[in-house]
Structure formats: C-alpha cells, structure tokens
Image: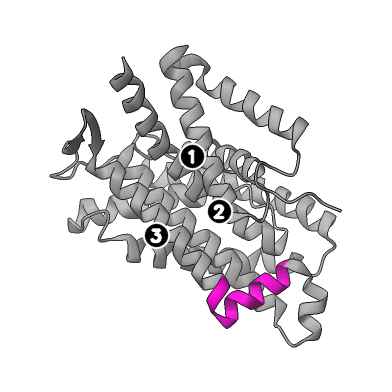
Amino acid sequence: MIEAITQNMVIGIMLGALYGLAAVGIAMVFGVTKFLNVAHGELLMFGGYSTFWLFKLFNIDPFLSLPLTILFLLLIGLVLYKLLFVRMVKMKEEEKIKNTMLVGFGLTLILQNIALNLWTANDRGVTTSYATESLMLLGIRFPYVRVAGLVISLVCLFALQQFLRKTYIGKAIRATTEDWEAASLVGIDVQKVYMLSFLIGTALAGVAGALVLVSYSVSPSIGLHWTLKSLIVMVLGGVGNFMGTFVGGILLGATESATAFFISGNYREVVGLIFFLLVLIFKPQGLFGAKER
C-alpha cells in the first residue's frame, strides 16, 4: 500500500513539473508586460507538434530536437508580438489585461483551427526506444521519459533564474517588472524588454509542449486545458514568483494524483479547483507571493 501511494505521488510530482514549467512561461509574460496571453496553451500545443514532426519526418529524438522546437516557437512568438501585442505596450495596466485577453481568445480559435486543418483532430504521440523503460529504486518505478522531463523543467527554471539575476538584460527585465516608468528613465528600452520577455515565455511554452508530447500526447484541443492549468498554478504560486509558481505546479500535480488514487480519477480536476479557490480566499497573493502593502 505504501509503495502504491509513493508511486502515485512520484507520478503526480512529475506531472506537476510540467504544470510548473508551462505556468512559468505565462507568469514570465504577465509579470513583466501585464499581457494576459490566454493563447499560451496553443503555443504549447504547437511546440508539441513541432517535436512530433521532427521525430516523424527526420527521426530526431524529441529531447535532441528541443533547440529546433525552441527556435520555431521563438519565430511564432516574434510574429505574434510584432503583429498583435506590440500595439498594447503603452496601454494602462487594466487596458492591457483586458485587451490582451480578448486578443488571446481570438488567437486561440485561429491557432486551433490552423492545427485542425493541418494535422486533423487525432491525438499524436511519439514512441522512442526508451519510452517504456524505467529505473526501479526501493520498489518505486521512475520512467526515464518523465524523469528527463522533470530534469529539463528544473534546468529551465534554474537557467531562467540565473539569467534574471546575473545578466544585464535580466536585471533590466527585473527593473521593468518593478516599475517600467522608472526603468525607462534610466535608459532601459522597455519595448525591447517586453518583446524579450514575451519570447522567453513562448520558448518555455514550446519546451513544455515537447515534454507533454513525450509523456502524453498532443492534439489541437489541448490548449485550453494547459492554459487553465497554467493560470491556476500562476495564482497558486504567486504572480511574479517563478520558483513559487513552479512549486505550485508540483503541489497541484501531487494533489490531483492523490485525489485520483484515494477518491476517483473523476474528481481530480474538482479537488484541484477547490484547492485553487481556498488559496484565493485565504491567501489571494498566492502561497509564495508577498503581501501587498
């Protein structure tokens, strides 16, 4: 019984790492630019399809094709930013949130229909030579694919933190997040910072999409699911706290997994939402967010 519970929690934590990585991408964009891109899940979906076709057509291992997937998502992000989101840079915060949400909903429909027309509604997945292999440790099975996903998620989070802390561009992003007007007064190009933040968020969505593909599958309809999970996790962890957001994803994944094990798989989403509502009621700044003065 204990082994079964532990095994269930291990799988939940690995799923939560995917939630966390996807949420860090949307949190990066919202925290810096105040753009609420509700088409984030569709970008994740395109990352999954990019990895799938690189494997299907050129037999490139999904993990080795990550740089190409990131490059593809960066190009998509650049086009979307230049065509749509750049127009909202100078709006007030409330107007940014409202208008980017509206743009995001429209973009969701467009990207979904593009995917449907190009690749049909069928689920797509990849089966590598090591897909069913796992490491046994103290009676607990650690699938190689999911362990690799957890490691890549942690590496992405660590690299992002080091980038924000140690580089000039990262410090400019942090300064813009605190006060974009003051940042512009000291010579920081706020528009470039916004664009770079949007591209980083898009790239993280692409990585998350590739990891979702190798662990589960992708289809044109998965975008909304992952957008909602990302928003829930972002609020759980605390907006602007990337480490807290990632931990919030792990907590949500573990909660859903425990619910499926002890109660029923039919209630895993409900319990996750109840957890989310309780955090909103009793700690609206998030589990790891700082209280506003």
Whether residue 51 appears in this view of the structure is yes
Q: Is residue 209 left or right of residue 162?
A: left
Type of colouring:
one colour
Q: Is residue 286 left or right of residue 205?
A: right
Residue that carries the numbered disc 2 in the rendered image: 243
Secondary element at image label 3? helix
Identify the residue at image location x=50%, y=70%: 162
Identify the residue at image location x=59%, y=41%: 233
Indicate yes or no whether the magenta region holds residue 173. Answer: yes
Indicate yes or no whether the magenta region holds residue 208. Answer: no
Whether residue 111 appears in this view of the structure is no
Q: Quadrant of residue 88?
A: bottom right
Secondary element at image label 2? helix
Query: Looking at the image, which is closer to me, 263 or 36?
Result: 263
Secondary element at image label 1? helix
Dividing the image into 4 quarters, which one contains the N terminus? top left
Identify the residue at image location x=80%, y=70%: 90
Label 3: how many Cα within 10 Å (few below 14, some 14–19, many 20+):
few
Q: Which residues are magenta?
A: 165-177
> Can you name the residue that lies furthest to the bottom here?
187
Q: Position of residue 256 (x, y in %)?
A: 49, 26
Residue that carries the numbered disc 1 in the rendered image: 250
Q: Quadrant of residue 177?
A: bottom right
Give the label on residue 155, or none: 3
